[in-house]
Image: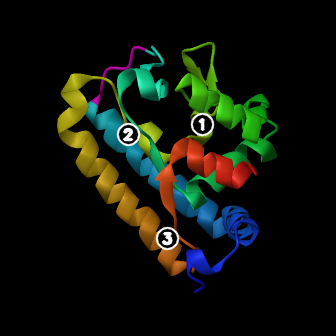
């Protein structure tokens, strides 16, 4: 497997997009999303749909993803013709960073990428009662994403959501 640092940005981006289009990768990511959904359903965290989770700077948190997750999200949105895919431009990502929020945030509260959002978005809840289990669930699921990279020889990079979007949208 090529190490990520040995690949140019365009080659790395292409590897992530190529991998994200593979059926077995989509199935694996779908299975992880389903597992997370089941875990969340069993815990029943409170979500007020306030959009606070998408206002990173204001509420003092960050979302981290792998390059594969970012590419899968963008590819999925684009393949389904979702209007939110317009948010995946360098300009939209930079504007979101300047505002301190997510480029897929609509009307300050709604997620334009809800169905395709990465694991961190699926697991994070503002509900204080959720703080005890969110971290361990995320760590377990992240290990699964790392293993997916390894099994399929997909270059691995992990970074802040908007930075990774910028890398895949360039």
User: Where residue 98 sits: x, y (%)?
Assistant: 59, 27
First to last magenta residue range? 44-48
In front: mark 1 or mark 2? 2
Of 47 and 95, nearer the camera is 95
Q: CA distance from mark 3 to mark 1?
A: 20 Å
Q: On the image, numbered disc 1 is attached to which residue?
A: 115
User: Where residue 60 sits: x, y (%)?
Assistant: 35, 28
Q: On the image, numbered disc 3 is attached to which residue?
A: 148
Q: Quadrant of residue 115?
A: top right
User: Where residue 112 sits: x, y (%)?
Assistant: 65, 28
- The reply to whether dot 1 and dot 2 touch (C-beta < 8 Å) is no
Of 111 and 158, nearer the camera is 158
Looking at the image, residue 147 lies above or below residue 153: above
Looking at the image, residue 31 lies above or below residue 12: above
Looking at the image, residue 53 lies above or below residue 6: above
Work out whether residue 53 can be spotted: no
Q: Is residue 151 left or right of residue 44?
A: right
Q: On the image, numbered disc 2 is attached to which residue?
A: 123
């Amino acid at each position: 497997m090529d190490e990520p640092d040995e690949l140019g940005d365009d080659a790395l981006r292409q590897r992530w997009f190529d991998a994200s289009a593979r059926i077995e990768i989509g199935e694996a990511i779908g299975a992880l999303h389903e597992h997370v959904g089941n875990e969340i359903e069993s815990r029943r965290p409170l979500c007020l749909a306030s959009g606070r989770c998408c206002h990173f700077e204001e509420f003092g948190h960050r979302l981290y993803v792998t390059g594969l997750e970012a590419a899968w999200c963008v590819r999925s949105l684009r393949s389904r013709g979702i209007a939110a895919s317009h948010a995946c431009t360098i300009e939209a990502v930079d504007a979101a960073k300047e505002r301190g929020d997510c480029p897929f945030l609509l009307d300050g509260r709604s997620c334009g990428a809800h169905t395709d959002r990465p694991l961190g978005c699926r697991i994070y809840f503002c509900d204080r009662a959720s703080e005890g289990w969110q971290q361990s669930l995320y760590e377990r699921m992240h290990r699964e994403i790392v293993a997916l990279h390894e099994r399929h020889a997909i270059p691995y990079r992990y970074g802040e959501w908007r930075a990774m979007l910028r890398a895949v949208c360039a």
